[in-house]
Amino acid sequence: MSRKITKEMRWGFGILSLYAVWAVAWFFYRSLIKGSIFRPYVPELNMQTELALPFSKGLILGADLLGRSLLEVLSAGLTYSLTISLIVTISTASIGIFMGYMAVKAPSWFKLCFDLLINIIFIFPSILIAIMIMAVTGQSMQGLIFALVITGWSGYAKIARGESKRVLALTYVEGARAVGIGEVRLFFRIIIPAILPVMIVNMVLGISGVIISEAALGFLGLGASPYSWGAMLGASKTVLLEAPHIAMILSLTMAGLIIGLNLLGDGLRDYLDPKEN
């Protein structure tokens, strides 16, 4: 069957394109216009504009409780969230693909350890595991990435295990083995390309999960940056009655990004997943 680009894919790609243009524009603004590559610009504190409303005092979206331009703070938070989510998603998917394949091909003792580890991660809420890891590693970007990777790879591993079993049972894989292709080459040349469409779909959907997890940790005070959207939401709750626009704008910005990712992921599932075509 021919593959068709769905409305969800178009809408998701359109929304994410706007966020991508926003992030690139902020990078050039902070690194080339207002600052430099070695000393990038950071939003300035100005107590004279504290809690300014949108379109007042020369600020398009107003200011936060520290008087910083809310547009600049949101821009810094966008680049931070996208950087964290992409690093974590690529890392967790890579670990998950390898572990999932090993769970199929490795000796029985490895499979037993794999199942035990997966069950432990799924028994305990991932947010609690991340909080414990952050308490040990401290509030840093490296610690945050490590915590999110530890709690996120298991989902990809379960998907990769199921897909690897399906692919290994196909006739052309047996033919490849018959002509003498080794296990390493088989993994990189046949298994990964075969399971990659399904993994890409789950990676796109997984980015939104990483953004939510990072925001949750930031809201609890365990973020790695003052520009974490979760940390900003946590601060905005203290001035919710005086400046409700801060929480509303933050929430809508985060919701738009997550909706775009979910729409694109749903569209890619219909387009790339071989079981849907």
Image (cartoon, grey):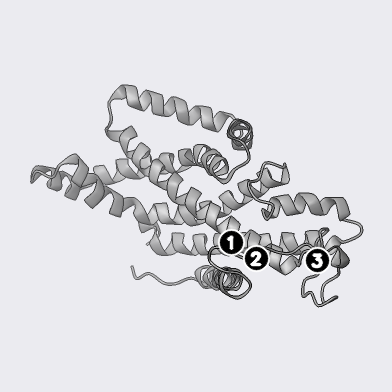
Q: Along the horizontal axis of the image, is 26 left or right of 186?
A: right
Front-most of 160 and 51? Answer: 51
Picture quarter with the N terminus: bottom left
Amino acid type, callout 1:
Thr
Q: Tell me whether the residue at label 1 lies in contact with that at label 2, contact meaning CB atoms closer than 8 angstroms.
A: yes
Residue at x 58%, y 34% (from the top left corner): 137
Q: Nearer the viewer, residue 17 or 60?
A: 60
Residue assigned mark 3: 63
Mark 1: few/some/many CA within 10 Å (<14, 14-19, 20+): many
Circle 3 crowding by C-alpha within 10 Å: few under 14, some 14–19, many from 20: many
Q: Earlier in the sequence, mark 3 or mark 1?
A: 3
Question: Residue 179 versus residue 23: which sits nearer the camera?
Answer: 23
Kindly state the secondary structure of the residue where label 3 is placed. Answer: loop
Q: Residues within 10 Å of mark 2 (few under 14, many from 20)?
A: many
Q: Quadrant of the C terminus?
A: bottom left
Residue 14, position as x, y percentages in the image: 55, 73
The percent position of residue 65, horizontal first and vertical second, equals 83, 58
Q: Earlier in the sequence, mark 3 or mark 2?
A: 3
Q: Residue at x 35, y 58 (%)?
A: 274
Label 3, label 2: how far apart the Cα atoms are: 13 Å
Q: CA distance from mark 1 to mark 2?
A: 6 Å
Dot label at residue 75 = 2
Q: Position of residue 53 (x, y in %)?
A: 86, 70
Residue 51 visible within the image: no
What is the secondary structure assignment of the residue under circle 2? helix
Q: Which residue is mark 1?
A: 79
Give residue 80's quadrant in the image.
Answer: bottom right
The residue at the point 64 percent across, 66 percent down is 41
Q: Is residue 22 left or right of residue 48?
A: left
| Residue 89 image offset from top left, x and y in percent | 48, 50
**Residue 84 appears in the picture as rendered:** yes
Closer-to-camera residue (270/77): 77
